[in-house]
Image (cartoon, coloured by chain):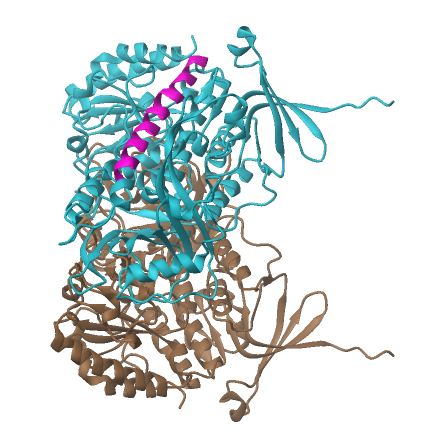
Chain colours: A brown, B cyan
Amino acid sequence: MPTVTTKESEVDVLIIGAGPAGLMAGNALAKNGINVRIIDQRPDKLGAGQADGIQPRTIEVFQAYGLADRLLKEGNQMHMAAFYNPSPDGGIELTDRVPDVTAESARYPFEVTLHQGAIESIFSDSMRCFGVEVSRPVVPTSIQLSEDESKLNDPNAYPIRVELLQVETEIVHAKFVVGADGAHSWVRKSIGIIMEGEQTDYIWGVVDLTPDTDFPDIRNRCVIHSNEGSCMVIPREDDKVRLYIQLGDKRTNVTSNGRIDKEKLHPHNLLETARKILQPYYIQTPEKFDWWTIYIVGQRVASRFSVKDRVFIVGDACHTHSPKAGQGMNASMNDSHNLAWKLTHVLKGWAKISLLKTYEFERKQYAQDLINFDKKFAKLFSGKPRTEDYQDGVSHEDFLKIFQTFGGFTSGIGIHYAESSITSEKHQDTAKNLIIGERILPQIFLRVADSRPVEIQDLMPSDARFKVLVFTGNSSSIDQLKKIRIVSQELDTLLSSLVKGKAVFDIITVSSAAKGRVRYNDLPKSLWSHWSKVLIDDTDVKGAQGGDGYRKYGIGPDGAIVIVRPDGYVGAIVPLDRVRDLETYFSGFVNA
Amino acid sequence: MPTVTTKESEVDVLIIGAGPAGLMAGNALAKNGINVRIIDQRPDKLGAGQADGIQPRTIEVFQAYGLADRLLKEGNQMHMAAFYNPSPDGGIELTDRVPDVTAESARYPFEVTLHQGAIESIFSDSMRCFGVEVSRPVVPTSIQLSEDESKLNDPNAYPIRVELLQVETEIVHAKFVVGADGAHSWVRKSIGIIMEGEQTDYIWGVVDLTPDTDFPDIRNRCVIHSNEGSCMVIPREDDKVRLYIQLGDKRTNVTSNGRIDKEKLHPHNLLETARKILQPYYIQTPEKFDWWTIYIVGQRVASRFSVKDRVFIVGDACHTHSPKAGQGMNASMNDSHNLAWKLTHVLKGWAKISLLKTYEFERKQYAQDLINFDKKFAKLFSGKPRTEDYQDGVSHEDFLKIFQTFGGFTSGIGIHYAESSITSEKHQDTAKNLIIGERILPQIFLRVADSRPVEIQDLMPSDARFKVLVFTGNSSSIDQLKKIRIVSQELDTLLSSLVKGKAVFDIITVSSAAKGRVRYNDLPKSLWSHWSKVLIDDTDVKGAQGGDGYRKYGIGPDGAIVIVRPDGYVGAIVPLDRVRDLETYFSGFVNA
């Protein structure tokens, strides 16, 4: 018998699943120069359907990866939400229109809708520029994690053995594995993580179509409570529209084995229900539906998000909930956004391996918050409307209240990470509106050298570096400039002493000096690695943009140093004369 | 002897020269579906140097072709102009900083600088998407225009015979020829057009480099008048900078045959002069210069811009002037922008051939205005600064005055085409701030269907269609809606009766109704070919953008119809009850 040799290979990070969560991780790691491989068992990329909503914070994250332009070019924007309720004459009528996004500080004050396949292409095209492509179809068949503690604690070891089946079998030895393989995650099941929570009784249908209709709010997000059931309208790219349609309860549409009876339900049935709900407006049956599905809302969170901080799960693999608040894809991609820079820092030897514990710490709490919100939202949304005859129903005021109260949360803008080794809650008063644990507030400052107004978020791309924002106070004052010189020396000494020194840091300097005669090169050289990194808090030449940033950030004339994590979240704040407190902060996770 | 057959071919438009003017024409015609061919005698596209300034109006034009995103991504922005003059202590000092662009209505209130090769690539990449590529190296060797009047008046005839030399000789029979072959235009000389005007005594050097300097305004446009001569600083893409350096007068640098003595002048000499001018600031000699040249300012305009309206010249082929006001490439590209839609309309049979007369009418006047401005500007710029010892010199106030007075002109925003068959000056009072003959003012309106704020310029792409802007007044008023219904019928009848009907027109409707409960489909269907074409004059959901458009346009509650030409210039304005005056307007140039 001939010897059969099985192909074996090594990789730093193996990502299983190339949906939005997997692709976000793959693109981020590839961009950071990490040796990464991404596989998917589907032979082709997604054509239509699935998730489609991108929340304001997620647009900011896309921008941080240089991908927002394309997202905005291809996607539809939802600026307005319209609410319809039963009319006294029968049918429905417009009750109210309100801004779809209520989060005050949203840089992009709207949601983008675009089908999931297009979003996946944005990532896969970007990833290709960094030399990484999805391998497909590749099926993982076994995963084993070493029990050797010394290996598990060594970021350079390959403690994970994954068996893959493509044309032939291959054994991959990975340093880390990311399971991004969806709600029925093979990775999750293989490593013994269970989902906690339950299924609801709500059954919904979804149809994607290009409608012929006289419904005047067809291009707004609409929440429709009618006596025929509830419906949500989500306008999409081009002239497409998605309808979420409430169906009868579980008993009438479920087979004896507990599954949805798809035999009984076809897109034409779904649209027929929508037509009743939308009366007196008409909606024609289209020649074809782009996509359709039916689902029972489940609200579950995984018991753990990783095993030994070597195998992680992200996205639908660790949380499922109702799709109508448009959170799913956002939660998934932001899991990976949170994890990718941490894996990068550990693999590059910059950070201690314990940094990876903060992934579950931060994202599991978020997922639980999301489920709690979803329970309230889904209940109100699926409830019957309040009418004269049914006073126990859901009133417009009830619904609007939860819609707006949770606006910060659903936009992603209000996501708050609790105190941990990477989030130090000291000195919040020094920049009292830059909430530690929340994303850095967008703000336009003026670049000193060329008077160009720049959004400070755009100086903080997702490049795995910590951003050190030095708010110097008024550098035109001789006394303040003296203080700034001292701070710049202390900071230089500190950053140089940290592992790998400045490669991990990028300094951005923001003076409160007024435009006019100010010069960028009056500041100490260590505060401007490049002329483009010196800003002032003033309006542009037309007085149209920028200004008032110190006040909006809650920073006084004494200035502040703000550390922004590689994912764009405020990690620490110190007064200018407390550079030593930054040493404490960084020593919590940086490799000695 | 064997028979030698020469290759012969036919083309609708032959463009000779693939610089910015030729490529603008090629891209525009290709986009409009015109059979076009573009040749250039240079074997390769441009690497570095040449023109580099894109004015605010030209950025708007790029946007109309869908090319502004890339221009803005690749280019540098100049927001501020700084003025330096002799210091009492010797050397120079900062006198003033002012906004570089003073035109109030500029949508992009800055200039973009980017080397000409990159700009050419923007066009050639776009043109490739429409199936047209530059043929190079191809040398034209003869051009003959038929004298047969019936052929000359038939837009479908091929009255021009051009002989081309590539590997073998080819005879091209063209309906129209566009000569975009530069200041030494072979086309111009071949068809016997002469340049009128003269050379000046001003000799200037240009160097492109990435400087090491402590000059604090190196990223602003700087006008430096020193006792060592004048210099202009133009910051460019990346960290590049262009310096224009005044050299001695003609006598010292010109050879006996009247040409510049390049033997005597090297980039190191030029930079040495710049170093003296820039004192007390240092500028190091770089390892290499990206590009350099020396020129004598010539100020000339071609006697004619076409022969028989079949052979046209555009760009440097019809005007030369000093480069320092950054007009050259802009004037050139806008010649082609003006010509391309006219050729399209004639070739498609929509317009009378006489439409082409308006090209020379409009662009020659502009070129003459440009030379007149340039004479004043170049004189002040090359003049010695006023000092205590030299009271006849140029004062900062003199220079600033011309800089700002001509700001509207140099930005391209103030370009005004005089009355002609396509520019009817009637009814200016109906929209008194939309100046007939000037480009449509940018303004953000709110899209009714989805409350998305949109820049109205973006609804008017350069697609060869006339845009019919119907300002309806308040469509929420029942009385006004009655009037609107009548207007919509009259307009529908008129547009349908014109040649090829609506394919040449795009209707955009702007109501002064307030947002809230307004519905896009309350307006007559003929006023909204698509839901995206109905706007209201109100702010966005955040109150941050839009609103006040009727007032800014000078339109009263009775509304107006504004005809915007395919190149973005206001062609005609009529009150809502004077649709018949539009018939008069269009009958002046539309084919019966």
State the residue in front, A269 or A415.
A415
Type of secondary structure dominating the magenta stretch:
helix
Relative side of A288 to B386, left or right: right
**Which quadrant is the C terminus of chain B positioned in?**
top left
Is residue B353 magenta-colored? yes
Q: Nearer the viewer, residue B235 or A46?
A: B235
**Residue placed furthest toward the front:** B256
Classify the position of the N terminus of chain B by image quarter. Answer: top right
Q: Position of residue A116 (x, y in %)?
A: 46, 53
| Quarter-of-image position of residue B271 | bottom left
Residue B442 is at least partly visible in this image: no
- Magenta-highlighted residues: B352-377
* Looking at the image, residue A178 lies above or below residue B411: below
Give x and y (percent) for residue B339: 43, 25
Q: Is residue A156 magenta?
A: no
Which residue sits at x=70%, y=72%? A169
Residue B107: x and y, percent?
27, 41
Q: Residue at x 16, y 45 (%)?
A: B392
Horizontal arrangement in the rendering, residue B591 relative to residue A483 (left or right): right
Placement of B284 over or under B348, stated as above or below? below
Q: Residue at x 21, y 21 (%)?
A: B560
